[in-house]
Image (cartoon, rainbow, N blue to C red):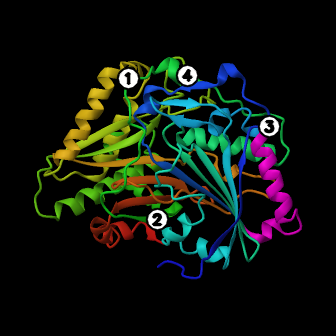
Amino acid sequence: MEMNNLNVEIISTESIKPSSPTPSEHRELKLSFLDQVAPSSYTPLLFFYTADQLHGGDDHRERCRKLKESLAETLNRFYLLAGTLVEAYLVDCNDDGVEFSEARVSGRMSEVMEKPHDVVSLLRLLPFDHDAVLERECILAVRYNVFECGGVVVALCVTHKIVDGTSATMFTKAWAAACRGDDKYPVVPTFDATELFPPMEIRGGNRRQSRMEKIVTRRFIFNKSNIAALKHQANSEAFLNQRPPSRVETVSGFLWKRFMAIAQQKPPTKAKRFAVIQAVNLRNRMDPPLPPNSFGNLWWFATADAPIDEEQDFPSLVAKIREAIKEIDGDYIKTIQDTEKSMKAKMKMGQMVYSGELELYSFTSWCSFPLYESDFGWGKPAWVCSPGRPYKNVVLFVNTSDGEGIEAWVNLTETDMKDFETDAELLSFASLS
């Protein structure tokens, strides 16, 4: 249930511009084909720091000042984040600035952290509704939330249209380092995606649309021991002479199995196949590999599918996911660079989903991202989350704070979630919180 006593009061709002003007030769940045086909939604990201961590350090006013100054400094390198997304998939790097707001929040931060199922309260900590259609094409906004107890939440909304998960964490890592005064190894992004994946002539596609269905988000926690038990089940003959299934492959296969089981309990539909797509980082899979600091949407989806009317065992589903990801190699990526062909393939899948012929679920893993290394000078965050997506059948994997478990943030329609969150097999390996 929503915390009725969570009152958020905006104290101040200002625009943080790069501390140095962006050079004229960097004024315009064309988006790549991969940016063009990326979701038009905003990605929410919240970093929680407890009052105990902050005790004895700077006061909130000084911390806020340091956040703003370091943000302005970091935007010199990540200058496109202070720009405006305009028509035809172009970023006007006009130094318009990043909206930075400060808010006071009633209640104790621990109450929010202990009730992650209350996604509505989590979203109230964001600088704006992450599913909103804004007056201008804002790229990034930040809010500094201070709770009555003294705890702090640094919250971001960044458009997925030009920023993937790797790029988002690249930026937060650089900003945090600047804020704590660590300039030994500054993160310098490169913007080379457009040369590798030239844009198509598409107009109007960056406009967001409101949700057609009510989406419900729940967090399911897979702890270390339950993941180990699932990995043991999944490690069948399909993985003979191979490395055992990874944590993410295992949990992905398990959730796919549960989604299929629930779908098969419903009245028959037109769906013939059940597919999952797994977002795959292309940077280290290209030939030659891209620098790790390559900025933008540099991912593609690996697709695994199975007939919807046939029983599929758990190990075979995990193996299907492994094989689909394995296919995304240097040669495969060259086919993605044929943008017209790639667009047709993406549209064909979309038409199959729209017609009901294909039941599709999307998995994204942030488990390899250094989210818990975001130390702004106050220590590592006690908790990091990215709650809520405006699309159904979407799952995001994030490490638990101890780095050994997985938080699966599952987004389903209200009807589907009622069946999913009460699935006995699911709850025997995951806790709903």
Q: How far apart are marks 4 and 1 (CA)?
A: 27 Å
Q: Position of residue 59 (x, y in %)?
A: 86, 65
Q: Farthest residue to the front: give it.
A: 135
Q: Label 1: which residue?
A: 201
Q: Where is residue 78 in the image (x, y as percent from the top left)?
A: 68, 34
Which residue is located at x 50 percent, y 31 percent? 298
Residue 235 visible in this rendered orientation of the protein: no
- Of badges 4 and 1, the one in the foreground is 1
Which mark, by number, is residue 219? 2
Which mark is in front, 3 or 4?
3
Looking at the image, can residue 106 be seen?
yes
Q: Is mark 1 on a helix, strand or loop?
A: loop
Image depth: mark 3 or mark 2 in front: 3
**Location of residue 3 by image quarter:** bottom right
Expressed as whole percent of the image width and height from the top left, the position of residue 399 reads 56, 55
Inspect the image, locate mark 1, and give the three-letter code of the amino acid beneath it. Glu
Residue 40 versus residue 387 in the image, above or below: above
The residue that disc 3 covers is 19
Q: Residue 289 carries which label?
A: 4
Packing grade of label 2 (10 A; few <14, some 14-19, many >=20) is: many
Please name whichever residue, 421 or 239, is drawn nearer the observer in this view of the structure: 421
Callout 3: SS = loop
